[in-house]
Amino acid sequence: VAQSRKVTLSDVAGRAGVSATTASYILNGRSAEMRISAGAQVRVREAAAELAYRPNRSARALRTATTKTFGLLSDFVASGQFASRMLTGASAAARAADHLLVMAESEGDAGLEGQIIEEMLDRQVDGIIYATVAARRATVPAPLHAENVVLLNCFDPASSLPTVLPDEFEGGRTAARTLIEAGTAERVFIVGHDEDARAIAGPLRVEGLTSGLAEAGKAVAGVVECAWRVPAAYGAVAAWLEHSPRPTALVCLNDRVAVGAYQALAEFGLRIPDDVAVVSFDGSDLAAWQRPPVTSIALPFEALGAAAVRVLMRDKSEPAASVRLPMSLVSGGSVPTPRPADRRSARA
Amino acid sequence: VAQSRKVTLSDVAGRAGVSATTASYILNGRSAEMRISAGAQVRVREAAAELAYRPNRSARALRTATTKTFGLLSDFVASGQFASRMLTGASAAARAADHLLVMAESEGDAGLEGQIIEEMLDRQVDGIIYATVAARRATVPAPLHAENVVLLNCFDPASSLPTVLPDEFEGGRTAARTLIEAGTAERVFIVGHDEDARAIAGPLRVEGLTSGLAEAGKAVAGVVECAWRVPAAYGAVAAWLEHSPRPTALVCLNDRVAVGAYQALAEFGLRIPDDVAVVSFDGSDLAAWQRPPVTSIALPFEALGAAAVRVLMRDKSEPAASVRLPMSLVSGGSVPTPRPADRRSARA
DNA sequence: CTGTTAGCGCCTTCAA
DNA sequence: TTGAAGGCGCTAACAG
C-alpha cells in the first residue's frame, strides 16, 4: 500500500530489516557483485513494492551527477514534419533506455540558444542533441564542445562532434534511378533553390541526382529556381511553363515545392504522371496527400532522432562515430510504372 | 574567468569574503529582506560573475523539492501541426518564466503513459501538462489527481483539474457567420465525421455552425460523413457529388478534410469560391497552401500551450480556473467576398 | 555479506 | 547583518 508521505530508501531498508546501503545495492541491481544474501534481496524487493518506493532522482543526481535525462535543442520545431517526427523517434529511443528528454527551441536566436544550453547544463543533462530543422552547416556554441553532444541534421566544420545526417547524396541518386527506370529522364528539371548558404540538403540532392543521371548518360536539363515554399514554387513553375519546352520530369527539392509544382502543372493541363513525372524529397504526409501521391525520397525522421540518442548513450570509451542514414524511396503515383522488362533490365 | 572545475556557492562566498549563507541570500534576491550590506552584495555579485557561477539545480531540487521544470505529456506529437505548435507556445512561455519542459509521448498507450508520469514525478517536475492532439474527453490517470496538472485540449468529466480548450462552439458560429455574410449559406453541407466517441471538436463545431446558421434562418442541408483524413474526404465528397444537388458551401471539419474536398471539387470542375464556398477548421499551414487558400477557423495553437503553462504557474492559493481560448478567422480565398453593403448590414 | 560514515551543493532555521 | 550547523535522499569508500 502506498504511503501518503514520500517513501524514502531508508523506509524500505527499515521495513526489510537492512541498512540503506544494502537496500541501495539490491535496488540498483548490484546484489551479485556485492554478494547480498538471497533473503535480504527478497525482503527488500517486497518492501519496495509494498511501499511503492520510487527513488528520488534529484538526490541521485546530486550524488552521481547524472540525471537519466537528455536535452534536445532545436532551432525550430513547428515547421513541417521534420522536428516533430524526429522528436518522436528521439523521445521513444530515450524512453526505451530509461531516459527522458528536456526540449527547447532556440527560434534561431543565438542569445536564446546560449541561455537554453546553460539551463540544460545546470540541470545536469547527460547529453545534448543539437538539432536543426533544415540540414545545414552550424556553429556549435563553445560551452557544448566539452560536453556529450551530438549534432542532428547539421554539422560543424570547426568541431569534431559526432553527427547524425541523412544521406542526401544517395537520396539524389535514388531519385535519378527512379526516373531512369521509368524512362522519364530525357528532360529533367530541378525545382527549388536554397537561399541559405549554409544549407546542404539541396546541393547534395542535386549532386546525387546529377551523378545518378550521368551513369545513364543523362544530365539535368535545367533548374527552376524558387524558395522551398508552396506559393513560391507554384509561381516559379507556372511562370516557367509559359516559355519552356515541356519537361519529362520535375525533381522537386522538397515536398512543399512539389505541392506548388502540382498546382502549376494542373493549371497548364499537364497530367501527372502521364505528361510529366514528379519526384520530390522528404517523404512527409504532404506528399502522400496529393493526387496522385508524390513519389518522394523520404527522410528517416524517426530513425534520425533515435540514432542521435544512441550516439549519446554509446560506451564513452569509444570515440563517437558519426552516422549517415539512408533515405528511402516512397512510391506514390507521380512517376509512371516502368514496364516489367524495363525494370528487370535496369536492376540487372 | 570561468574555472575548469565546477564552481560552487561557497567558492563564490569565499572569493567575496562572506559565508555561503550570505551569498545564497544575495544571489536569491533576498538581500533587502535580510538587510545585507551593500558592500557584500557588490562583492558577491562580482565574484559570481567572475567565476561564472551557476547554481546546481539538482542540489537545489533536493533541498527545495522544486525543479523549475514542467512535464508535457502528449498522446501524439507527430501528427499535424497541433502538437508541435502547441509545444512551441508552451516551451516559449515556460522559458520566459525560467522553466524548461520535459516532454514525452504516450503513443496512446495507457501503460506507457503511466510509466512516463512516474518518470516525470520522480524528477520532481513542478507541474504536468496533460495534452491530447485531438480535442476530446480523457481519463486522467490517478497519480495526476494530486499533482499540479492542467489538461490541454481535453477534459476529464471525472476530475476537477483545470483545463485549457479552444472555443470550438464559437468557432462554429464564426464559420456560419462567414458563410452568411458571403451569401453562400443556402445549401451548406458539413464534411467530416468523428468516429471516436470521445472526440468533442467535431460535435461542438457542428453545434456552433447550426446555431449560427439558425440566427439567419438557415440550417445545415446535410452531412457528408468521412474520417478526418485527406483520402477519405476526397473519396466521400467525390462519391457524394455524383448524386447530390450542388452545395453553395462546404464546411470541412478540419483542414485535411478540406484538402480532400478541394481535390473532389476540382475533379468535378467546380470552382472555388465561384461555384462552391469552402470553410474549414484548424488554420494549419495546409489550408494556406491550397489554391485558393482555404478560409479556416484557426486554433490558437501557440496560445493554448502558453495558457497551459500559465495555469501551472498560477498563484497556488487560487483555485485554478479553466481557460477557453477563441478561434480566429483566417480568410483565404475559398469564400466569396461579400459586397460592401452586405458586409455592413450583416455587422449591424 | 552488511552497516557506518561521509559527503554531493544548496537552503534555512537558529544564534551571535 | 552575518555565520555555523543540519539535513534534503542517495551512493560509495571503508570497515568489519
Image (tube, coloured by chain):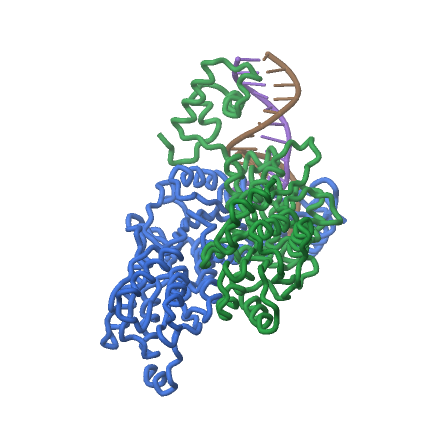
Chain colours: A blue, B green, C brown, D purple
Q: Is residue B118 visible?
A: no
In the rendered image, residue D7, in percent from the top left (x then y), is placed at 64, 32
The reply, left or right, for residue B322 in relation to residue B33 is right
The vertical placement of B244 against A311, above or below, is below
Q: What residue lies at 53% left-to-right and 45% top-to-bottom?
A: A67
Residue at 50% from the left image edge and 66% from the top image edge: B270
Displayed quadrant of residue A224? bottom left
Image location (x, y in percent) of residue B313? 61, 35
Point 70% across, 56% down: residue: A42
Farthest residue in the bottom direction?
Answer: A341
Compared to B242, does A59 lie above or below?
above
A194 sits left or right of A31 in the view: left
Residue in the foreground of this view, choosing between B104 and A238: A238
Percent position (x, y) of residue B204? 67, 52
Evaluate whether residue B174 shows in this view.
Answer: yes
B235 to the left or right of A306: right
- Compare residues A136 and B295 and report the one nearer the observer: B295
Q: How many marks?
A: 0
